[in-house]
Amino acid sequence: AQSLEWRLKVELKDINRQADAAIHRAEDLINKQYEPERTDQAAQHFKERQDFEKREERIAGKIQNAFSAIRHRGEIDTDSARGAVGDAFNYLTNRKARAEALDKLHRIKDRQLSRAQREELGAARNKINADRSALLSQAKSGFNSDRMAMLERHAKDKKKMKAAWDARTDERKRAFDTVVKKAQVKKSAKARPEQESQARKDFKRAAERAKRKRSRGKGRTRTRD
């Protein structure tokens, strides 16, 4: 189990490392893709500013700049309280208002480009993180499956070991029983000669006593004669 946990830890770490590296690569790629667009937009804004300044030198140019600001009013002055007519009059009569309208329009375009870049970066991160989550979940599921399989193997091995141990225990018991039986047989065999020897001694004593009695009986008979 400890080996499996270590393997899971290494696998999760490797998944996170690869996901982080993929995010960095995606960010670098997207940022590089937006660099030319930012450069082009900055150049366009610079040219529009130069053209604005040239037009401001003529009455017709001032009117053209004013109409340009009015055309983009919905983007530029969304919070204006003057209304469309008030804003149009302000642009026609105020150079500063016309210049601020152009600068504000450029800032809006820059923010739109930055937002598009952030959204693309976010989408790439979300996709990679979703893949990361799936791989992490897969690794954890694999760990759980491997762990259950290992526990089952251990249970089977433990059962086999117990059966083998019980078999060896029975075998030893039978061996000891055989030794004990052999010892009992030897003891019985040894006891029988001793019993037979004692019986012979008793028989001999009884025979000798009977013989002595007979001898004494014969002696008394001779004396009477």
Image: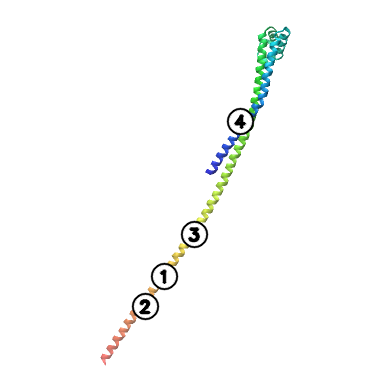
Query: Within 10 angstroms of label 4, few (less than 14), some, or many (20 or more) residues?
Result: few
- Of the numbered discs 3 and 4, the one sitting upstream in the chain is 4
Report how far apart the C-alphas of labels 1 and 4 lie in the structure.
Answer: 93 Å
Badge 1 vs badge 4, beta-carbon distance below 8 Å: no
Task: Choose between 59 and 89: the one closer to the eye.
Answer: 59
Q: Is residue 20 above or below residue 91?
A: below
Dot 1 amino acid type: Ser
- Of the numbered discs 3 and 2, the one sitting upstream in the chain is 3
Which residue does the numbered mark 2 point to in the structure image? 200
Which residue does the numbered mark 4 point to in the structure image? 24
- Of the numbered discs 1 and 3, the one sitting upstream in the chain is 3
Badge nearest the viewer, 2 or 4: 4
Residue 188: mark = 1
Badge nearest the viewer, 1 or 4: 4
Dot 2 amino acid type: Arg
Q: Is residue 37 left or right of residue 14?
A: right
